Structure formats: structure tokens, C-alpha cells
Amino acid sequence: MSDRALPDGWTIHTRPALGLTALTLHDDDGEFCQTDYHEQTSPPAHRDACTVLRALDNLPAPHVYRALDKVPVSLRDAAQALLNGYFERLAQTQADAAALRQAIPDFDALTNRLRRAVPDCHTDAYRDDQTGLYSLVLAATGAAAGRLLTLLATWPHAARASDDELPDGVTADLATTTTLTVTLDTRRTRDFLDWYRGDSGLPVDFDAADTARRAGEAELAARMAACLREIGVEADTANTGSTCWVAVVALSERLHLEVFFPEGEGWSWTLHCDGEQIDVGYWSTTSTTEAAGHIANLKESLGATVG
């Protein structure tokens, strides 16, 4: 693999100590990316406590930066190795993430559903450089942390664990903050999402009754339309007058379903032909995901009848 160029604005900081030189890579926002160590075989090039290398041989725009002083070849090579290693590990992380997504084609749909079940839940990919293992990291704060913990305890792998300990490959850390971080290795990520795909777990809407009171009809209709699209049902939203919004599922050029959430009721639907209402129904559930499943089944059954 050829040497990587130091991207514009990126820097490598060095700090000599105890016969070693610590090199740290920073991006163009100054954020830390990676560190490595180089054994000094000669006096440091600079006596400053912190030196910034702004030049490598293959810097794409050498006129933008200059070296603060002559940098020894060995130190320059160490800086190049640091840069190469960072992008190699980044590429491997991306490859691992792509492999996991290929193994779980509905990964995005499942994590989107999870973020609705656990408000503001953050999902991140993490690859341990030492083990090479890829992990799924879930993090939630405050009341949502309790929601995430409840979901984890509902998962059979965790529920069956002895002595209240989580199964191998799963860790949960609350630390000293109100943020709960759950890490699942590759195997447990697949186990968890396979279960979550086929099990309701928690209702997707966090405190659905309260959410319905706070959310407007437009937001609820948009949420339903998005949920339907995630399970392969084409849907859009429409305004039926004033503040009345519905999710719309087309059955044919003449027939369509309108789905909505009346205050104090469950999800409801009306069937229209050439603009005229010809049928109506409702479900007692307030869960968007559960109602979306009912709609998919209803669409299939109506399609078999009306063509």
C-alpha cells in the first residue's frame, strides 16, 4: 500500500520523553485521531515541549505548510507510519461495518426503529484495534437510559444470564453520569438485532399516549409513513384540511388508504375509492410499528381482492 498524504490542515504533534517520542495525529479541526511512539536514536529535532510536523514528503500542497526545522528521517518515517496506520485501521473499520451491514440488510431500519423506542439513543460502530472485533455501541441518557436498560433486560440472551450478569460479548456501563452505554460484539449484535426484528420488545413509541398528546398530526403521520417505508410499504403524507394530516398508502390508481391517529384512540384507517370513503377501521394499539404491520397485512388482503 502506498504512503498516505497528510490531508490539508491535519498536523502531527510530537513530544519527546524518556527516550521516546510520542506522535499524535490531529485532524483539521484539531481533534485527536491516533497516537504512536518512536524510539529516539539521536537528540530530538526540537527542544520545545511540543513540536508540530507540518510537512511530509508527499504533502499534496507543500507551499501551504513548512517544517519548523529539519526533521530527522527516522522521525519523518515514524510520522508516515502513524498516518498510514490510521487510515489502514479506518479502512478496516469501514470494511467490517460494511460486512455487518451485508449480513444484516435491514440494519438501518432496525437501528432507526430502536432510536424511536429509546429516544435520542445513539448508535455507533467501534472496532477494537487489539482484537480486531467490531462492536455496536448504544448510548442513552436520563430517562432514555432506563428505557435502554429495560430493552436489554427483555432480550432473552440477557434475561437468561445467571447471577444478573450480562452474557459474554455484552457490556453495560453507567459510569458516573446518567448516560448508559451498551456495547455488543459482532456475534451479539447479530443476535440482538435478529431478536429485535421479530420481537416487539418495547413499544416503538416512547410513552405513546404522552407522545400523541405532544406531537401534532403532521408529525404522527410522517412517523407512520416513515415506518411503513421501512417495512417495504410505499407511503406518503397528505393534508386533509386545516391541521388534519394522514399517512397515505396507494392500492391502485382509484383506491387508497388513509391512516391517522385520533386523539384518545388507537391508529385508524379509512379506505377511499375515487375520493369517496367506502370503508373504515381501527386498531386499539398506539404503537406505530405494530399498526404499520397491521396496515401491511391489510394492504396485502385488499390487494388480493381488488387487484
Image (cartoon, rainbow, N blue to C red):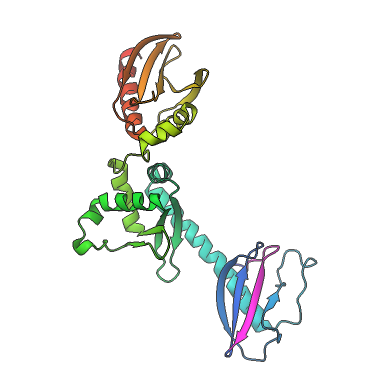
Question: Which residue corresponds to the image point at 53% horizontal and 62% vertical from the top-left?
Answer: 90
Q: Is residue 6 left or right of residue 91?
A: right
Residue 26: image x %, image y %?
Answer: 62, 68
* Left or right of residue 225, residue 267 in this image: left
Question: Which residue is depicted at the point 22% across and 61% down?
Answer: 164
Q: Name the quadrant containing residue 228.
A: top left
Left or right: residue 128 compared with residue 172? right
The C terminus, quarter of image: top left
How far across and how far down the image is residue 255, in percent? 41, 13
Residue 154 in view: yes
Q: Above or below — where is 207 with respect to 305?
A: below
Query: Is 278 on the left-hand or right-hand side of 98?
Result: left
- Residue closest to the eye, 15 or 131: 15
Please state the horizontal and vertical placement of residue 62, each as a whole percent of the image. Answer: 77, 67
Asked if the stretch drawn in magenta spans residue 6, the answer is: yes
Question: x%, y% of residue 2?
Answer: 61, 67
Residue shown at the point (49%, 27%) measured from the top left: 218
Which image quadrant is residue 82 in? bottom right
Q: Which residues are magenta?
A: 3-17
Q: Relative to residue 238, is residue 185 depicted above or below? A: below
Residue at left 34%, top 34%?
A: 287
Q: Quadrant of the N terminus?
A: bottom right
* Image quarter of residue 10: bottom right
Q: Nearer the viewer, residue 172 or 225?
A: 172
Q: Observer-nearest residue: 291 or 254?
A: 291
Membership of 282 in magenta stretch: no
State how many labels appear. 0
Is residue 229 at all visible to an observer of this figure? no
